[in-house]
Amino acid sequence: MPLAHITLATRDVQASLTFFAEALGWHPINRPGNIGRRAAWLEIAPGQELHLVEVVGFAPSPFEAEFGRHIALAFPAAEFDALKRRLLAHGATLIEPERATPFERFFFRDPNGYVFEVVDAGHESAA
């Protein structure tokens, strides 16, 4: 059962759309017209999407963390440095992992406060 989409609340849909498109390279796609609020859809990978919806007064959970809620992404380790530069240039904060793993990885907090883990796409299994 593959993951179809993730929905994230945001105070600013356009700023979030720009962050994910420019920092991560995700592509904006058409969205349904029945949302009733500002929203944007992005394709993460074939058949996988991120849905952004504007929520007035949105605040991130205090449980966004390595040992809390986060979203993990696979990315080639050889491209980590370039990705980190793009993330920083677009307002993300890099976070050091709390525990060591046998593969390369790092965490970042996006401008909304969500935490993402980036793991080496070439590793065999998550630890």
Image (tube, rainbow, N blue to C red):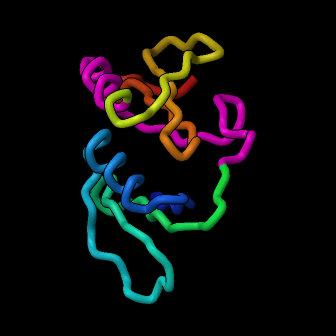
Q: Is residue 4 visible?
A: no
| Residue 113 vs residue 68, the one in the foreground | 113
Q: Quadrant of residue 65?
A: top right
Q: Is residue 67 magenta?
A: yes
Query: Which residue is found at the position 36% from the left and 31% from the top?
Result: 87
Is 62 displayed left or right of 55 in the figure? right
Locate residue 73: give its quadrant: top left
Specify start and end residues of the magenta stretch as a single range: 60-87
Q: As displayed, is residue 30 above or below residue 61?
A: below
Give the vertical position of 62 relative to 8 (above or below): above
User: Residue, x 27% and y 62% (percent of image)?
Assistant: 28
Q: Which quarter of the image is occupied by the C terminus?
A: top right
Q: Residue 69: image x %, image y %?
A: 66, 42
Q: Position of residue 95 (x, y in %)?
A: 54, 21
- Please give left or right for residue 86 compared with residue 69 in the image: left
Q: Is residue 41 visible?
A: yes
Q: Is residue 68 magenta?
A: yes
For the point 56% across and 37% down, which residue is it? Answer: 115
Residue 35, image x, y percentages:
48, 83
Residue closest to the eye, 99 or 21 = 21
